[in-house]
Image (tube, rainbow, N blue to C red):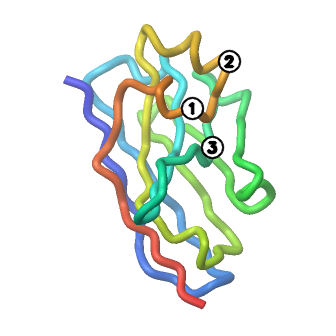
Amino acid sequence: QVQLVESGGGSVQAGGSLRLSCAASGYTYSMYSMGWFRQAPGKEREGVASLSTGGGTTYYADSVKGRFTISRDNAKNTLYLQMNSLKPEDTAMYYCAATDHTGDYCWRISPLNPTCFGYWGQGTQVTVSS
């Protein structure tokens, strides 16, 4: 059974940093593309960043470019999101996700589309105060 477990969320002041981690188990982690998504109250889930199986290709939402960095360590089955220069509008529940064998083609077309990802974690809350 595939499991994705996020950690590293918390409360910070604007301008601060957080590093999210996502530990994966139950499948061949290195075979699938991964991503980070977020959902604020009353809003739709949106793609923040995603990367390819080897980590060599990355995609970012315009709102986080230059501030967030996605990376993966396939030896540790772990995905990361380094978030710097945080803003109050970054406040949301953050989710880790992985494509499945049917979603990888979708990911190539639309790498920040939630519907391309078949596996999801439970989320970790990030709150940024002004």
Please say if the residues under marks 2 and 1 sit with CB atoms less than 8 Å apart. yes
Q: Residue furthest left?
A: 1
The relative height of residue 102 versus residue 45 in the rendered view (above or below) is above
What's the distance in space between the residues labelled 2 and 1, CA to CA?
A: 9 Å
Direction from residue 113 to residue 122 in the image, left or right: left
Q: Secondary structure at mark 2?
A: helix
The relative height of residue 42 versus residue 6 in the rendered view (above or below) is below
Q: Quadrant of the C terminus?
A: bottom right
Q: Which mark is residue 49?
A: 3
Please say if the residues under marks 2 and 3 sit with CB atoms less than 8 Å apart. no
Q: Nearer the viewer, residue 32 or 105?
A: 105
Q: Nearer the viewer, residue 85 or 88?
A: 88
Q: Secondary structure at mark 3?
A: strand
- Which residue type does callout 1 highlight? Asn
Question: Horizontal and vertical percent for residue 63?
Answer: 73, 58
Question: Horizontal and vertical percent for residue 52?
Answer: 63, 25
Q: Nearer the viewer, residue 70 or 89?
A: 89
The residue pinned by badge 1 equals 113
